[in-house]
Image (tube, rainbow, N blue to C red):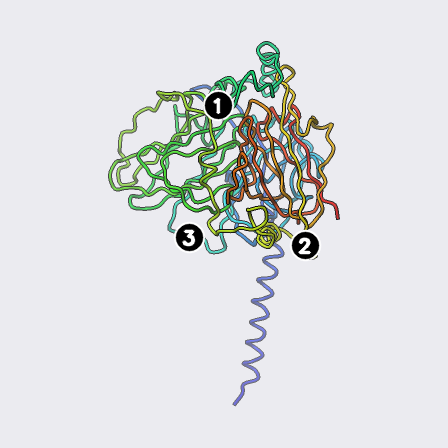
């Protein structure tokens, strides 16, 4: 016989459970991220830098795909700031830049809220003045809904450090530029891509290079288990430095670039430009007690690193590792970029990604509407140049903030040809989108999806993206002092 009272009780219980779940989700407290000062020790000397931490000391933010990024940024500094979520495709008013919001005043806060639709390794950093030079940055890691628990994650944020203030560094750059480089930067007779000198690789001589705020005099030590796989999440958060990653005795499997999966590349050496991220899997062998993971600055002997220690050999003696390598690292090049391809093969417009795939790539990343699809193709030119004597850097012969926007039609497939006429490499970053590399120096490739690409001197890179994310989106060099001196513009969608 049907028990009506039991049915009512079960129904009531189910309603209470559902209501509780809904209420707990609605009443979930936002995550607090505090922009604050941080005391560190570099080469035995005390220094004060910036950091972005949660109240419990967690550095940065760790979330899950399809969850809400519900964050209040509290600025505890005595100066304004604004924090950008590098690599995320998100609504324009959530981008965390001076183009779309007022700076966060001292001792005030700003609330961000949007859905996370990506997975991978990203980061957050100041987009205000020269604050990034003082390490105002943190990891932003997004796991899948069902993370693979067996693997250990280690985040490695590469940083360049100076005891000087960023303003002093800028002044020194200007003085050195005026004294040593009267020529125009695109003078091919003065220097070609194939004969680039160390002076053209690094504008700043730093006091130290760090990983996670530590140098090699007191490196971060991570315990790892033998016969296990470790995911090394490299983030190049430096202001003006590109690195060669050296895994030493370990073989690495590069599986993701800028949060996007790629067909694995096996090596023990990798290149990483400013703003880029690499996810590298390493298998910890039974033998040996420790493993040095090093990052050497291109054009120098300077290096930084961390140590992985086999947890079964905790008492292993770890020798002091010098901050100077035995040989000078060469300049980064396109060899790695030419090998990269997406894990899931795609082909289509202009020899690159098909229109439908492009739409899926970006449109799933935010609240765009399918009605934006127009299936039209547009091309834009982005010419990078500079004047070393005045240390002025330009895009399309315009210096930020005296720049006119680059307009594209919403819903169009955009092909962008980036031409670097200068003698320096420029890590170019596009906000709000991921783009696909489709050609390097005219050679068509089925390249990776990225949000930042290091464009070598006197070379061209062609990328494409689907313009489905409405708004004004910065496109700029991620060399901090190049951006500060003008190499920035923005792309604006038209209905």
| Mark 3 → mark 2, Cα distance in angstroms | 35 Å
> How many labels were placed on the picture?
3
> Residue 373 has which mark?
2
* Left or right: 306, with 5 as reference point: left
Q: Secondary structure at mark 2?
A: loop
* Left or right: 113, with 341 as reference point: right
**Neighbourhood count class around disc 1 (C-alpha, 10 Å): few under 14, some 14–19, many 20 upward:** few
Q: Secondary structure at mark 3?
A: loop
Q: Return the residue nearer the eye: 485 or 372.
A: 372
Percent position of residue 457, x then y: 54, 26
Nearer mark to the viewer, of 3 and 1 = 1
Q: Which residue is mark 1?
A: 194
| Mark 3 → mark 1, Cα distance in angstroms | 44 Å
Percent position of residue 277, x then y: 49, 38
**Neighbourhood count class around disc 2 (C-alpha, 10 Å): few under 14, some 14–19, many 20 upward:** some
Nearer mark to the viewer, of 3 and 2 = 2
**Neighbourhood count class around disc 3 (C-alpha, 10 Å): few under 14, some 14–19, many 20 upward:** few
Q: Contact (CB < 8 A) between labels 3 and 1?
A: no
Percent position of residue 50, x then y: 56, 29
Q: Which residue is mark 3?
A: 148
Q: Return the residue nearer the eye: 137 or 465.
A: 465
Q: Earlier in the sequence, mark 3 or mark 2?
A: 3
Q: Residue furthest left?
A: 287
Percent position of residue 80, x then y: 67, 30
Q: Residue at x 41, y 32 (%)?
A: 245
| Mark 1 → mark 2, Cα distance in angstroms | 43 Å
Q: Residue at x 37, y 21 (%)?
A: 327
Nearer mark to the viewer, of 1 and 2 = 1
């Amino acid at each position: 016989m049907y028990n009506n009272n039991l049915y009512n009780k079960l129904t009531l219980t189910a309603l209470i459970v559902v209501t509780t779940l809904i209420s707990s989700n609605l009443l979930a407290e936002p995550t607090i991220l505090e922009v604050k000062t941080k005391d560190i020790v570099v080469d035995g000397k005390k220094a004060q830098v910036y950091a972005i931490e949660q109240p419990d000391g967690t550095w940065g933010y760790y979330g899950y795909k399809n969850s809400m990024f519900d964050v209040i940024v509290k600025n505890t500094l005595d100066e304004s700031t604004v924090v950008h979520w590098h690599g995320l495709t998100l609504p324009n008013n959530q981008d965390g830049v001076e183009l779309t919001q007022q700076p966060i005043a001292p001792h005030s806060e700003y609330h961000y809220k949007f859905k996370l639709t990506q997975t991978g390794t990203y980061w957050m950093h100041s987009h205000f003045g020269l604050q990034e030079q003082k390490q105002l940055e943190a990891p932003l890691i997004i796991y899948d809904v069902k993370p693979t628990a067996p693997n250990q994650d280690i985040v490695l944020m590469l940083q360049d450090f100076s005891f000087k203030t960023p303003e002093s560094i800028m002044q020194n750059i200007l003085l050195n530029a005026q004294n040593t480089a009267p020529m125009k930067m695109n003078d091919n007779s003065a220097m070609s891509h194939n004969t680039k000198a160390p002076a053209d690789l690094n504008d700043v001589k730093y006091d130290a290079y760090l990983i996670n705020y530590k140098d090699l005099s007191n490196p971060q030590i991570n315990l790892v288990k033998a016969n296990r796989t470790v995911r090394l999440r490299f983030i190049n958060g430096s202001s003006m430095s590109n690195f060669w990653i050296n895994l030493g005795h370990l073989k690495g499997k590069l599986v993701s670039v800028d949060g996007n999966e790629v067909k694995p590349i096996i090596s023990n050496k990798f290149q990483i430009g400013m703003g880029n991220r690499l996810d590298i899997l390493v298998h910890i062998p039974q033998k040996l007690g420790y493993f040095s993971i090093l990052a050497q600055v291109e054009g120098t002997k300077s290096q930084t690193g961390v140590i992985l220690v086999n947890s079964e050999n905790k008492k292993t003696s770890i020798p002091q590792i010098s901050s100077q390598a035995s040989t000078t690292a060469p300049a980064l090049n396109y060899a790695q970029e030419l090998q990269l391809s997406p894990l899931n093969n795609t082909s289509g417009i202009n020899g690159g990604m098909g229109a439908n795939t492009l739409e899926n790539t970006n449109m799933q990343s935010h609240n765009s509407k399918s009605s934006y699809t127009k299936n039209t193709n547009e091309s834009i030119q982005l010419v990078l140049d500079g004047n070393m004597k005045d240390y002025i850097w330009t895009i399309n012969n315009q210096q930020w903030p005296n720049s006119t926007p680059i307009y594209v039609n919403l819903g169009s497939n955009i092909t962008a040809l980036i031409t670097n006429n200068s003698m320096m490499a420029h890590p170019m970053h596009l906000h709000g989108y991921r783009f696909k590399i489709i050609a390097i120096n005219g050679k068509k490739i089925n390249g990776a999806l990225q949000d930042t690409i290091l464009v070598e001197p006197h070379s061209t890179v062609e990328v494409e993206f689907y313009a489905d994310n409405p708004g004004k989106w910065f496109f700029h060099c991620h060399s901090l002092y190049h951006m500060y001196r003008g190499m920035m513009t923005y792309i604006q969608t038209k209905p």
